[in-house]
């Protein structure tokens, strides 16, 4: 989570990062990638990397 516990910030940030997984070749900073992956796991929502162009 962004602020230490699940908050409205996560509700806004995670979908944005998930949508960006549609873009091939993005070099994610480690902390951002870890956050994105952790949120995907916690919410059981798949990232879109397999469809990236």
Image (cartoon, rainbow, N blue to C red):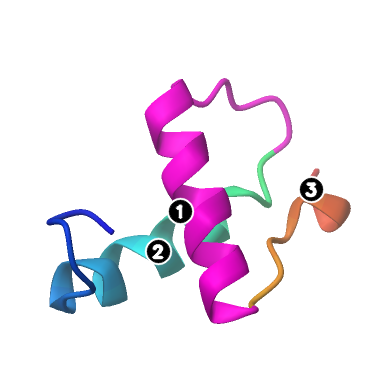
- Image quadrant where residue 51 sits: bottom right
Range shown magenta: 24-44
The quarter of the image holding the N terminus is: bottom left
> Mark on residue 14?
2
Question: Is residue 36 on the magenta stretch?
Answer: yes
User: Do callouts 1 and 3 mark residues in contact (Cβ within 8 Å)?
Assistant: no
SS label for mark 2: helix
- At x 21% / y 54%, what residue is drawn? 2
Q: Position of residue 19 (x, y in %)?
A: 55, 60
Distance from label 2 to label 3 (Cα)?
A: 17 Å
Q: Nearer the viewer, residue 10 or 25?
A: 10
User: Do callouts 2 and 3 mark residues in contact (Cβ within 8 Å)?
Assistant: no
- At x 52% / y 55%, what residue is drawn? 38
Residue named by callout 3 = 52
Q: Position of residue 18 (x, y in %)?
A: 54, 60
Residue named by callout 1 = 17
- Front label number (1 vs 3): 1
Distance from label 1 to label 3 (Cα)?
A: 13 Å
SS label for mark 1: helix
Q: Earlier in the sequence, mark 2 or mark 3?
A: 2
Query: In the picture shown, does residue 46 fall above or below 33?
Result: below
- At x 42% / y 47%, what residue is drawn? 35
Query: In the picture shown, does residue 25 fall above or below 15?
Result: above
């Amino acid at each position: 989570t962004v602020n230490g516990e699940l908050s409205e910030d996560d509700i806004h940030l995670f979908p944005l990062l998930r949508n960006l997984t549609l873009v091939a070749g993005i070099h994610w900073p480690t902390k951002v990638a870890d956050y994105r992956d952790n949120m995907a796991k916690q919410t059981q929502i798949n990232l879109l990397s397999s469809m990236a162009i």
